[in-house]
């Protein structure tokens, strides 16, 4: 592995229903880039113990040529899942940041990720992998993964829109209460902030609403961070042509392809989210919402520790 070229891994962290699937699939259209989806769920989903056994291409994960190369490796699925649960849960983020270099289980998992990422890169001919796993603890481990250059994208969406999204059943995704969704939103974002605070030069903060408001400009900035020529930006105005992807789990919209209009559905919560769900979300999330600029159309609070994309969003 020492002779292999360095592989860029853009890890998207934050909470679910924040737009990571569509953003990852847009980046998947870049030459040399590959969106893996939520890689951490591969082993559980592939053998029927997760939420969805299908690859983004529509075939079973175990039958997809790309994922077969990973799944046929020496690691047993049960062992991988057990190690993930023991070492890289969100609550472990601070321990991973402080102890990854000294902890044998964490070093073993980092070595496993190194082999996995390299296998994917070799199978796809990619030099950039986009991992929308969203686990801050796994993002925290990336500096200890040999042969990669980690970049961090902390992606945030208005928690009221996230709460509203979680009230909807989407194929294999079951609903979640406002309290539970918002608790996860707060926890994942607080942990993500700590990861990006430790790695400021490799980190970018982005609100989903700002990506949708200016998708081309957002992708341009991400290309700059990844070292990719802006001329390869696949976004034309507000449209991108999506091809087949090979994502693991994620939003069911990942199965769509063809010309896709990049537009938000964030206004739906204004008329459909119940007063009680809205109140619960605000009560739990308002400190972070204020910091992220979700009140009075403000921009996110300036932070010298990382790049902040976008200039403001609506209340």
Image (cartoon, helix red, strand yellow):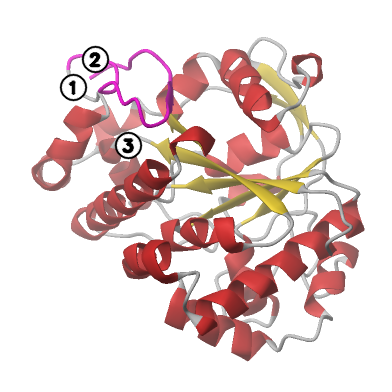
Question: Label 2: how many residues lie within 10 Å, few (<14), some (14-19) or many (20+)?
Answer: some
Q: Examine the rendering and report whether any part of residue 261 can be seen.
A: no
Report the residue marked by disc 3.
161
Q: Residue at horizontal 60%, vertical 37%?
A: 22
- Contact between labelled residues 2 and 1, with CB atoms less than 8 Å apart: yes
Q: Secondary structure at mark 2?
A: loop
Residue drawn where x is 29% and y is 57% of the image:
184
Residue that appears at 81% across and 67% down: 67
Left or right, 85 with respect to 23, comes to left
> Does the magenta-highlighted stretch encompass residue 218?
no
- The mark found on residue 295 in the picture is 1
Q: Is residue 127 left or right of residue 264?
A: right
Residue 228 appears left or right of 211: right
Q: Quadrant of the N terminus?
A: bottom right
Which residue is drawn at the image coordinates 83% and 61% (left, top)? Answer: 2
In the rendered structure, which disc, 3 or 2, sits on the residue that comes first in sequence?
A: 3
Disc 2 target residue: 298
Q: Is residue 56 above or below residue 87?
A: above
Give coordinates of residue 301: x percent, y percent. 25, 23
């Amino acid at each position: 592995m020492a002779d292999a070229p360095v592989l860029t891994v853009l890890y998207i962290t934050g909470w679910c229903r924040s737009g990571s699937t569509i953003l990852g699939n847009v980046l998947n259209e870049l030459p040399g880039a590959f969106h893996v989806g939520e890689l951490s769920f591969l082993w559980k989903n592939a053998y029927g113990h997760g939420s969805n056994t299908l690859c983004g291409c529509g075939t079973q994960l175990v039958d997809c040529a790309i994922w077969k190369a990973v799944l046929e490796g020496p690691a047993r699925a049960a062992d991988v899942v057990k190690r993930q649960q023991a070492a890289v849960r969100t609550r472990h983020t601070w321990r991973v940041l402080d102890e990854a270099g000294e902890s044998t289980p964490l070093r073993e998992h980092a070595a496993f990720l190194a082999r996995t990422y390299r296998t994917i890169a070799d199978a796809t001919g990619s030099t950039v992998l986009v991992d929308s796993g969203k686990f801050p603890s796994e993002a925290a481990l990336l500096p200890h993964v040999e042969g990669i250059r980690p970049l961090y994208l902390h992606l945030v969406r208005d928690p009221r829109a996230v709460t509203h999204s979680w009230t909807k059943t989407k194929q294999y995704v079951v609903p979640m209460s406002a309290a539970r969704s918002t608790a996860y939103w707060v926890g994942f974002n607080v942990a993500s902030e700590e990861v990006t605070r430790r790695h400021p030069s490799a980190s970018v903060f982005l609100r989903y609403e700002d990506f949708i408001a200016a998708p081309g400009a957002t992708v341009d900035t991400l290309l700059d961070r990844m070292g990719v020529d802006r001329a390869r930006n696949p976004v034309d105005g507000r449209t991108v042509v999506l091809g087949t992807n090979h994502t693991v789990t994620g939003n069911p919209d990942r199965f769509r392809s063809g010309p896709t209009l990049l537009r938000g559905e964030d206004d739906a919560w204004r008329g459909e989210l119940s007063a009680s769900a809205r109140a619960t979300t605000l009560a739990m999330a308002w400190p972070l919402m204020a910091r992220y600029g979700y009140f009075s159309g403000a921009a996110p609070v300036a932070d010298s520790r990382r790049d902040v994309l976008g200039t403001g969003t609506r209340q």
